[in-house]
Image (cartoon, coloured by chain):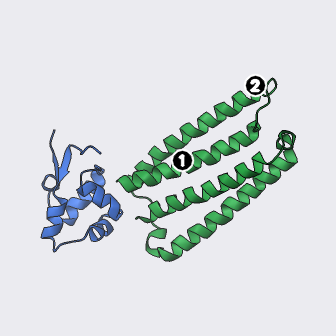
Amino acid sequence: MAKLAITNTIRIQRFHHNEMTQQQLADRVGVTRQTIAAIESARYSPSLEVAFKIAAVFEQPLENIFQFTP
Amino acid sequence: MSYTQKTRLLEAGITLIVLFNYLQAVLSMTPEAQMDPTLASGLLIKLVIQTVVMLVIMHSILAAFNSKYANQPLDEREQAIALKAKRVSLIILQMGVINAVFAMLIGTVYPVPISPLHQLVIAALLSEVIGTAVESWLLYRG
């Protein structure tokens, strides 16, 4: 499957947040672990709401988590 | 494997079993028996009861083993995947309806092996099987 133009640093952020697991992040955001895995590997672009929730979990601005590379 | 994925896989399996049983029952009937409304409605009632019982048992067992996820609604990715799968399912159903109408039209001239009513039911079951299978595949792929 083709990768999306939106990349992210979720894996790095999880590492910096005490090796947070995908399940822990999923529980805090309110999605399934599979959805976090899909977002992390750039196979799925989240909605703005989920993107902001992920950024809020890591206490970072949105652009630090998601980058658009045309 | 997520709860939704397990549910869809089992739903596909159950619908496949129901479809197989229905096909077997219909193909074992004579063309005249297929057109009999009493026999057809009996077969449909049996199909509905069989489906409901199997689905209730499946959902109960799954919910018992995955109580954390059983009450959670689908998340946005799962909803998007469900929509895509429904589109595929709808195409199969439309083809089934067109086929049944065509069979009804030519049925007066040429004998068709399965009556249009049963063709419609088979199309509905087949669209459900394919829809849930596509959804499972899309959930697996990510």
- The mark found on residue A39 in the picture is none
Image chain in blue: A
Chain on which label 2 sits: B
Q: Mark 1 points at which residue?
A: B130
Image chain in green: B
- Where is residue A56 shown, x and y percent of the image? 21, 62
Same chain check for tags 1 and 2? yes
Q: Callout 2: few (<14), some (14-19), or many (20+) C-alpha neighbours within 10 Å?
A: few
Amino acid on which the number 2 mark rests in the picture: Ile
Q: Which of marks 1 and 2 is nearer the N terminus?
A: 2
Q: Nearer the viewer, residue A48 or B90?
A: B90
Evaluate whether residue B79 shows in this view: no
Q: Callout 1: few (<14), some (14-19), or many (20+) C-alpha neighbours within 10 Å?
A: many
Q: What element carries label 1?
A: helix
Classify residue A31 as left or right of residue B129.
Answer: left
Q: Quadrant of the C terminus of chain A?
A: top left
Q: Is mark 2 on a helix, strand or loop?
A: helix
Q: Which of B11 and A49 is in front in this view?
A: B11
Q: Do the residues labelled 1 and 2 touch (CB within 8 Å)?
A: no
- Establish if B103 lies above or below A18: above
Evaluate whether residue B74 shows in this view: yes
- Where is residue B34 shown, x and y percent of the image? 82, 43
Chain on which label 1 sits: B
- Establish if A24 lies above or below B7: below
Q: Mark 2 points at which residue?
A: B106
- Establish if B26 lies above or below A20: above
Q: Quadrant of the N terminus of chain A?
A: top left
Classify residue A32 as left or right of residue B65.
Answer: left
Q: Residue at x 62, y 69 (%)?
A: B57
Classify residue B17 as left or right of residue B67.
Answer: right
- Where is residue B131 shown, x and y percent of the image? 52, 48
